[in-house]
Image (spheres, rainbow, N blue to C red):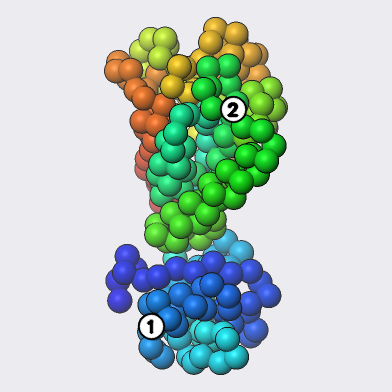
Amino acid sequence: MALRDMYNFFVDATARVGDRYYIVGSDYNHIKNVLRMRVGEEFLVSDGGKSHLCTLEEYQDESAVAVIATEDYQSAELSVRIKLFQGLPKGDKLELIIQKAVELGAYEIVPVEMSRSVVKLDDRKKKSKQERWQAIAESAAKQSKRNVIPAVREAVSYAQALEMAKETDVFMVPYENEDGMKATAAALERIKKGCSVGILIGPEGGFDDREIEMAKAAGGEAVSLGKRILRAETASIAAVAMCMLYAEMNTESGAE
């Protein structure tokens, strides 16, 4: 079976005993009653950042027993860790952004409350939204055969986001008023294997002047995504894709 056709299930280390995984809960139900997998069928099991090729051995005691056929079968992770700091957009746009960012290889997504964010979340809504967003990330990780499920954080303040972004090795701020691509090219060239890359995207209304100055003071580099004005969701996808492509071409094994 081709890799693209295989199902992928995420488990924790407690599910493994020797060379077998005992898959329980909703994934067990999905394997047995939804997919109706038969003994001998292959699928991926991701555990601790590694994905193993497994074969369904049997069903027993409300668990699907999968024996490992090939350890560390494939890696879909980038050699860099992309952290997307996303200004809260309206409606369900963030759900699309999370889905596509995970597919493109983002490692972590942090929703950010900004001055021009229309959406305002109280503590209760932050928790429920985060749970919904994390479920979308898990679904996208399964679909794209990721080895890990990227973390989606609860929404944070702009100041908190900048403190987190300071910890990244390369901190890029796509900004519609930045002219030319020289700064973009220079920032990309600083991306090396094993480094972390922070990307800060504004909401629909973009950044206000004070936020840009604060980002620069925190080490952010204003960059351009081209001559066209992009919607917030387009800018996020374009920026993550740009970094993903650069990393794949220049920092993966055999590229250097």
Q: Residues within 10 Å of mark 2 (few under 14, many from 20)?
A: few
Q: How many numbered circles does the render carry?
A: 2
Image quadrant holding the N terminus, namely bottom left
Disc 2 residue type (three-letter) = Lys
Q: Which mark is residue 163?
A: none
In front here: 240 or 152? 152
Residue 95 in the image: x percent, y percent? 45, 42
Residue situated furthest top in the rendering: 209
Find the distance from the CA under tag 2 to the CA under tag 1. 43 Å
- Residue 24: tell me if it is visible: yes
Q: Which residue is mark 2?
A: 120
Image quadrant holding the C terminus, namely top left
Q: Which residue is mark 1?
A: 36
Query: Can you say whether 97 is above or below 103 in the image?
Result: above
Residue 128 in the image: x percent, y percent? 61, 46
Local secondary structure at mark 1? loop
Residue 163 in the image: x percent, y percent? 70, 27
Local secondary structure at mark 2? loop
In front here: 224 or 123? 123
Q: Quadrant of residue 181?
A: top left
Residue 94 in the image: x percent, y percent? 46, 37
> In the shown orientation, is residue 214 left or right of residue 4?
right
Q: Residues within 10 Å of mark 1 (few under 14, many from 20)?
A: few
> In the shown orientation, is residue 76 left or right of residue 196?
left
